[in-house]
Amino acid sequence: MEKELEGQGNDVSDLAEIPSAQVITSTLADPTTLAIVTQPIVSLDDGGVVGYEALARFAGEISTERLFIEASELGLGAELEAIALERGLAVLRFLPRGFVLHVNVSPIYLGMQEIHRTLISAPLHRVVIELTEHVPVSETKQLRRQLAIYRSLGARIALDDAGAGYGGLELMYELEPDMIKIDRFLIEDIDHSETKAAVVSTLVAAARSRGIKVVAEGIETRAEFDETSRLGIDLGQGYWIARPGSGLPRVNTAKLSHSSRKERNVTLGRELAEVTESVATALGSTSFPDQPFGIGVDHYGRPLFLWSRGTDGVEHVRNVTEVACGSSLRECLRRGLARGVETRFDPLVVTDHTRRVLGVVRLERLLSGDQQRQGVEAS
């Protein structure tokens, strides 16, 4: 595509034979050809809808992302985004009170007249501005000044695609957004990837320490919903919750309620509370007098190792197996039984969203509780 555009400048008439250029120019000529769909954003605590994201849909089969990229290459990006933004904000006319509307804006266009005029004419106290592209950290001072204008009018700011690169983490600290949206790459199959879960857990902890809400994008399965919920993410959206559609698509409230933290009784780890025991911790200590076991921790209270004394009086130092405070009992049992025979019955270490030690869970108690639940289900 870049070779096709080379040397053609912004002369749209020369691009009439390029399908994407035809869509762009026809949209600029008649903005009503650009459709807006919305996708619900829900709370993972109770499954309730908190807002909607307005998404542009162009005529034809060319992807929205590609069209915006190519419009930028043609020098028409700001004009096209202004149309999409204006039509997206029109959703506010029928959006019930109490819900917020997410709209997408490229940071490079925030200072342009078309975008600025469209934003300040909207009731921004009901709007979340999603920054759809990363910018060099060297340019964040100007961006912060621009965002301050919209924040003074009540807008909230979200940083899209968090976790997609180190620059995204830098921007979270530089721009101090109200929300970050976890990149879809990290959400896909997160229930099968301890690495992705660890990365997301770190992002959640970093965001929480700064009062930033976290949104999981692209939740497409029940297992992804459960895992993002377990990791303490605040909000979610994706095909499993509801597909984008015209008007305000409905969600299956019964399905979401059943899967929510509140219904599963794991908010703040309440499900684990009944089986979690207190444990002695010490900063880097390898000995716990008068204790059967203890946890060595770092300066932040995060676990380093498990210390135990056997019945023969021999001391052992082993790696810990962590479980997040929002985990279900079945997940804890699965993690425990997946270990080798030698460490299978070591206590599991329960940690909060910053990985500080809250206590331990013995596998014996988990097995006993699981057998009791199976007996109840069988009866």
Image (spheres, grey):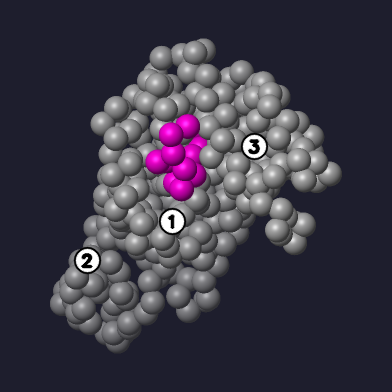
Residue 104 in view, yes or no: yes
Q: Element type at marker 1?
A: loop
Q: Element type at marker 3?
A: loop
Q: Is residue 378 left or right of residue 95?
A: right
Q: Which residues are magenta?
A: 102-114
Would you say the residues marked 3 and 1 are in contact, meaning their CB atoms lie under 8 Å apart?
Answer: no
The residue located at (68%, 23%) in the rendering is 30
The residue located at (47%, 43%) in the rendering is 109
- In the figure, 307 relative to 369: above or below? below
Residue 212 in view, yes or no: no
**Identity, as a three-letter code, of the amino acid under mark 3:** Tyr
- In the figure, 131 relative to 139: above or below? above
The image quadrant where one finds the N terminus is bottom right
Badge 3 or badge 1: first in the primary sequence: 1
Question: Which of the pair 169/104 is nearer the observer?
Answer: 104
The residue beneath circle 1 is: 135
Badge 2 or badge 1: first in the primary sequence: 1
The residue beneath circle 3 is: 239
Q: Quadrant of residue 22?
A: top right
Residue 295: horizontal and vertical position, in percent?
26, 71
Judged by depth in the image, the label closer to the viewer, 2 or 3, is: 3
Disc 2/disc 1 C-alpha distance (Å) = 32 Å
Badge 2 or badge 3: first in the primary sequence: 3
Q: Element type at marker 2?
A: loop
Question: Which of the pair 159/39 is nearer the observer?
Answer: 159
Residue 231 among those drawn in magenta: no
Badge 3, how many Cα within 10 Å: few under 14, some, many 20+? some
Judged by depth in the image, the label closer to the viewer, 3 or 1, is: 1
**Identity, as a three-letter code, of the amino acid under mark 1:** Val
Going by the picture, which residue comes out furthest to the left?
Answer: 289
Badge 1, how many Cα within 10 Å: few under 14, some, many 20+? some
The residue beneath circle 2 is: 300
